[in-house]
Amino acid sequence: MDQRIWHIGVAVDDLEKGKKEFAEVFGVSWRPTRVRALTLTDAQGADHEVECHVTFSEGGPFAVELWESIPGTPLAAAPGGGVHHIGYWVDDIAQENERLSALGFGPHATVGPRPLLNTGPSGTVVELCDLHSDRPQLRDLFPAGSPYAGPPVLDSDL
């Protein structure tokens, strides 16, 4: 199990303004924005059909994930703003979910039956990121030794 942090997720009210702010403050540049249609199930069992507009910073090995907040869903901005979650690589999502449960981390959101976000006793939200699921745009952020590690495949490369 790798358990290496590879991104910090931040929900912003306006994605373009958020990208500009992070670029000005931290000097980061951005990968192309993606739109992902998801069905998220929250901790109370309610389903949310969402269209998430999301981007990741370029470079690495650590990334910032920005998306436009979706109020009333697990992808809403964190109370008071700021960091929403910490994402880390997981070799076996089911096993890691069991380990987190034993540590008091309850479900925050799932995609179908797959755990996505868990919340800890102190309110920390973590994202379980599957080492076995290719993300071509983010290949440079996979840990060394992963079959998906390598140069990112950006829209301009397609």
Image (tube, grey):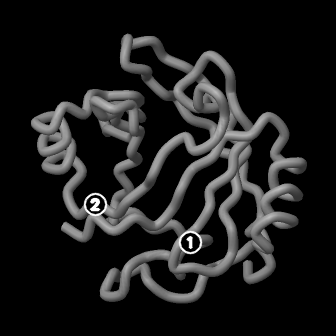
Taking the image as shown, residue 38 lies to the left or right of residue 123, namely right
**Secondary-structure class at tag 1:** helix
Q: Residue at x 69, y 34 (%)?
A: 51
In this image, 85 relative to 17: left or right?
Answer: left
Q: Residue at x 33, y 32 (%)?
A: 122
Q: Dividing the image into 4 quarters, which one contains the C terminus?
A: bottom right
Q: Residues within 10 Å of mark 2 (few under 14, many from 20)?
A: many
Q: Is residue 96 left or right of residue 89?
A: left
- The N terminus: image quadrant: bottom left
Q: Position of residue 22 (x, y in %)?
A: 78, 60
Q: Position of residue 86 (x, y in %)?
A: 45, 51
Closer to the N terminus: mark 2 or mark 1? Answer: 2
Residue at position x 35%, y 82% from top? 147
User: What residue is pinned by disc 2?
Assistant: 90
Query: What secondary structure is found at the residue carrying circle 2?
Result: strand
Circle on res. 138: 1
Asked whether, in this view, residue 153 is left or right of residue 21, the answer is left
Which is more toward the observer, 96 or 124?
124
Q: CA distance from mark 2 to mark 1?
A: 15 Å
The three-letter amino acid code for the residue at tag 2 is Val
Rate crowding at label 1 as few (under 14), some (14 to 19) or many (20 or more) other CA atoms within 10 Å.
many
The label shown at residue 66 is none
Where does residue 156 sit, x and y in percent of width and height?
80, 79
